Image: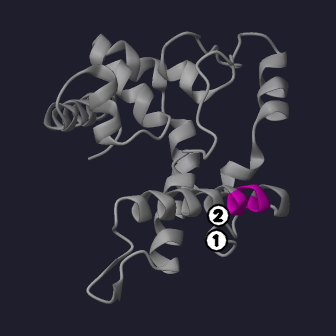
């Protein structure tokens, strides 16, 4: 896990490794309860497999302790559309200073994160309908297709269709081929 998060500073890396260990443990307990840890003398829940899936889920933002929908700064609160985030790109002279002082510099090391930050999300959101904005918000919080389907009460296939629609919206704004 430490190698997977090598692009982060020591404190952030330690936190992500702890999250991965907790996710691995939870996955193993779940697999064991379902009798999926071994079959016909073959280990199904190997340490490598557990670590790979745990690292993947932590990378996209899932946390072992869950997510709050009452904490104003929590991802779950944004996903539930209970708060509105306001950009620090204010028309004032202090906007640039504030943005630089608040920015999480650890995430800038990841090229995908840097690209995500450069997108004009307000323009993209303006071109989306309500359901597309909801899916976009849940995707940004790291939810998977099945989880999104449950939250917005549609089938996973419909979520995939909405994702395709979102790709079209993002292209229409001028991003992508």
User: Is residue 140 positioned above or below 122 on the image?
Assistant: below
Q: In this view, does 88 lie to the left or right of 135?
A: right
User: Is residue 133 positioned above or below 13 on the image?
Assistant: above
Marks 1 and 2, Cα distance to the nearest angstrom? 8 Å
From the viewer's side, name the closer residue of 15 and 38: 38
Residue at far bottom of view:
41
Magenta stretch: residue 15 in it?
yes
Q: Whole-percent x and y of residue 79?
A: 48, 22
In which quadrant of the rendered view does residue 155 lie?
A: top left
User: Is residue 56 positioned above or below 65 on the image?
Assistant: below
**Render colour scheme:** one colour
Labels 1 and 2: the sequence-earlier one: 1
From the viewer's side, name the closer residue of 55 and 176: 55
Residue at image coords 59%, 37%: 66
Badge nearest the viewer, 1 or 2: 2
The kind of secondary structure the magenta stretch mainly shows is helix
Q: Whole-percent x and y of residue 156?
A: 20, 37
What secondary structure is found at the residue carrying circle 1? loop
User: What's drawn in magenta, residue-wise?
Assistant: 13-18
Q: Do the CB atoms of the residues marked 1 and 2 lie less than 8 Å apart? A: yes
Q: Is residue 138 left or right of residue 17?
A: left
Residue at image coords 76%, 47%: 105
Magenta stretch: residue 107 in it?
no
What secondary structure is found at the residue carrying circle 2? helix
Residue matched to label 1: 1
In which quadrant of the rendered view does residue 118 lie?
A: top right
Residue at image coords 34%, 68%: 36
Are there few (<14), some (14-19), or many (20+) residues within 10 Å of tag 1? some
Q: Whole-percent x and y of residue 141?
A: 50, 35
Residue matched to label 2: 21
Residue at image coords 25%, 35%: 163
Q: Is residue 30 left or right of residue 110?
A: left
């Amino acid at each position: 896990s430490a190698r997977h998060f090598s692009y982060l500073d020591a404190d952030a890396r330690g936190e992500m490794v702890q999250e991965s260990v907790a996710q691995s443990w939870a996955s193993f307990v779940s697999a064991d309860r379902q009798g999926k840890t071994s079959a016909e003398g073959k280990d199904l829940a190997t340490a490598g497999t557990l670590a790979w899936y745990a690292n993947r889920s932590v990378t996209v933002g899932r946390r072992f302790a869950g997510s709050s929908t009452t904490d104003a700064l929590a991802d779950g609160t944004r996903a539930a559309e209970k708060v509105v985030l306001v950009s620090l790109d204010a028309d004032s002279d202090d906007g640039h200073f504030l943005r630089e002082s608040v920015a999480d510099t650890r995430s800038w090391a990841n090229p995908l994160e840097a690209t995500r930050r450069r997108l004009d999300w307000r323009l993209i959101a303006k071109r989306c309908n309500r359901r597309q904005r909801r899916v976009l918000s849940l995707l940004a919080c790291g939810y998977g297709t099945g989880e999104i389907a449950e939250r917005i009460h549609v089938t996973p296939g419909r979520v995939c269709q909405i994702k395709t629609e979102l790709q079209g919206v993002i292209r229409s704004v001028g991003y992508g081929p």
